[in-house]
Image (tube, rainbow, N blue to C red):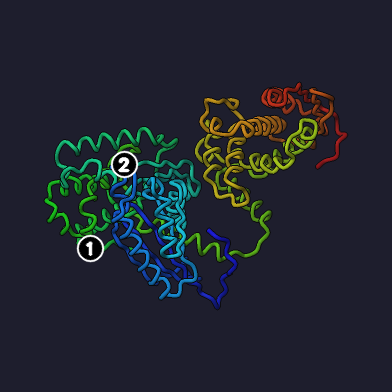
Amino acid sequence: MPEQQTYLTPDIAPRLAAIDIGSNSIRLVVAESDPRNHYRVLDEERETTRLGRALAAHGCLDETSMAATVDALRRFQAIAAGLQAEQVRAIATCAVREAENGQEFCDLVRAQLGLEIDVISAEEEADLAFQSVRRRSDLTGKNTLLADIGGGSTEIVIASGEFVESVYATPLGAVRLTEKFAAGQSLAGDNYGQMVRWIDRELRRSCDKPSAPLHLMVGSGGTFTSLGAMVMAARGLSRLPAAGCQASRADVRHLIDRLRKMPAKLRREMPGLSADRADIIVPGLVVIDRIMRRFRVNVLQVHPYGVRDGMLLQMFDALRGDGTPAPFRLDEQLDRFADMCGADAARGKYVAELAAQIYDAVALRFHLDPHDVRLLRTAARLQDVGYLIGYEKHHKHSYHLILHSRLDAFRPEEIELIANVARYHRGSEPKNRHENFRKLAPPDRHRVRVLAGVLRIAGGLDRSHNRTVRAVQAGGAGRVVELAVSAAESPEVDLWAARRRVGLLETALDAEISVEWAGNLVANY
């Protein structure tokens, strides 16, 4: 999103518009900033254009759907202009992302409407949906699964508290499944069983089971809001409440059985179900049912918001910049991240300082990038955030939590490096068979080996957790590195631990490393 130069003041209430171009429908929300809340919705519009209906069969967007979508976008632009929206952001998801002619569609919209479309990744789509949930629900102390079902895909997020552990992208979209399996609208015959088995295989292939039991499942997207509306209708309520509702897996299975037996005409008249979703609702509900089975969840919370809400929250956040210098924001962000995950933020800073001293001491001799110390410090401070999930494999959990974090001071490729360095602060050394390590470019693999090797030694120097070591200096010559440790008295346990951990850095630098107590000669940092 382009950088914003406007800042909110009490006298200015800017209006923004968000457009979500999905595989089944496109949606518009125009909102105005509300200091008492996140924002106030001024207008909403939705049109079903089925942009992704030919994708499964032909791999392309068909001309009829593209033309219908362009016409709808033209109307949406007029609505946004009439409401004096200062900024319009349009995103496209699965259909445009996967289509062979997706760029052609974006070029067509730009040429006819002057509207730039941001084709976002599945991970970005999941993040927008999760930010909506995080800002509107108390997730403290909860292991949460968020499922966002669209026309072409379903994104699944596993989170601990406010922090994302894993994001999974699956091809389980309601429109895609309808195109693939719905020879008849009822899905009452052999195709239904084939669809269920295919969904189960995709979930097994795409998603690992969570490391800890889930406390909550949250659902966003049209399939979930339709489910909630039908459940509310069965309970005698005319609409889905603004706070959403809860539904059990039994509710989902009951609706599947009931809808499969209905002819198309009766299904379109089902209370709570919009007529234009009647032909895709069964596949969508089956995705919900199989996710609940896969992750052993019996109750879900329907979240009436989703990607568009996440977009608007992000857009208004950009306007609310307070000018605080980024380094201070980052320092506070890292402390908060560590504290909320149950890690010792003070120890993280201490180990980060020791690691930086070791790295700076060897960087010049071994031609290392001096700027990488910034990544090393951050990895040291966040190495133990995986405690949020559990101790035993906390280094692996730290990798996922950091990878999906919102550290605005770093580029995505830098966050990937930080996550890998934290991943290897303990446990097995980096190996090419590890997917997270294998996908790095060879130069970045070397950087991770060096930085993680340094971090292991620095962590060893506080094995006693007494913070006895005051500073570290490096001596020696050639391929020999002599680390001189300053402490008021001999830190035997810390020296023992550090010596055990020199192997990774020795291999990475092709050097021989020794760690010795140098007395209390080096000034305290």
Q: Picture quarter containing residue 65?
A: bottom left
Residue toward you, 438 or 476: 438
Residue toward you, 334 or 113: 113
Residue 164 at x, y percent in the picture: 49, 45
Residue at point 59% right, 49% down? 407
**Does 174 sit left or right of 1 as displayed?**
left
Which image quarter is the C terminus in?
A: top right
Q: Give the label on residue 292, or none.
A: 2
**Does 312 sit left or right of 373 as displayed?**
left
Q: Is residue 101 visible?
A: yes
Q: Picture quarter containing residue 348?
A: top right
Marks 1 and 2, the one that precedes in the sequence: 1
**Residue type pointed to by label 2:** Met
Real-space Cα distance between discs 1 and 2?
25 Å
Residue 263 at x, y percent in the picture: 11, 51
Residue 195 at x, y percent in the picture: 24, 38
**Residue type pointed to by label 1:** Leu
Q: Give the label on residue 237, or none.
A: 1
